[in-house]
Image (cartoon, grey):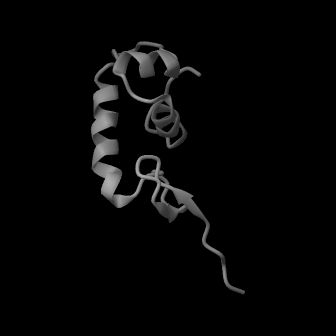
């Protein structure tokens, strides 16, 4: 029995990628995703509790990216 591969769209360029790519972005957009993550992380203060919506506004990064990073375990914020 063959296993079907599921596809999803890259969050940045909408290119179809395998849903097995846990990052949610294609190889070409991975650098941009990494840069936005580092920029966003720079707006966090050690021990600070912040809602994702507040972090999105503070960093100027789309909330959907922050939510994806939380789901992927890259951020541990109070939801």
As drawn, 15 above or below 56 = below
Question: Which residue is painted at 51% across and 34% down in the image?
Answer: 64
Q: Quadrant of the C terminus?
A: top right
Vertical arrangement, residue 65 with respect to residue 49, above or below: below
Q: Is 27 drawn above or below residue 52 in the view shown?
A: below
Residue 12 or residue 34, whichever sits in front: 12
Q: Quadrant of the N terminus?
A: bottom right
**Horizontal arrangement in the rendering, residue 53 relative to residue 34 (left or right):** right
Tell me residue 3's x, y (percent): 66, 78
The residue sitting at 48% across, 63% down in the picture is: 17
Horizontal arrangement in the rendering, residue 9 relative to residue 28 (left or right): right
Nearer the observer, 47 or 69:
69
Q: Residue at x 47, y 15 (%)?
A: 54
Residue at figure coordinates x 50%, y 62% from the top left: 16
Q: Position of residue 9 (x, y in %)?
A: 52, 55
Looking at the image, residue 7 sits to the left or right of residue 29; the answer is: right
Residue 29 point in image, percent of width and height: 34, 52
Q: Is residue 40 left or right of residue 22?
A: left
Q: How many marks?
A: 0
């Amino acid at each position: 029995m063959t296993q079907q591969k599921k596809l999803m769209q890259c969050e940045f360029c909408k290119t179809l990628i395998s849903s097995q790519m846990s990052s949610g972005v294609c190889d070409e957009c991975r650098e941009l995703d990494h840069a936005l993550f580092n920029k966003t992380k720079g707006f966090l203060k050690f021990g600070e509790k912040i809602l994702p919506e507040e972090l999105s506004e503070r960093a100027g990064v789309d909330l959907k990216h922050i939510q994806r990073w939380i789901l992927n375990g890259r951020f541990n914020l109070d939801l």
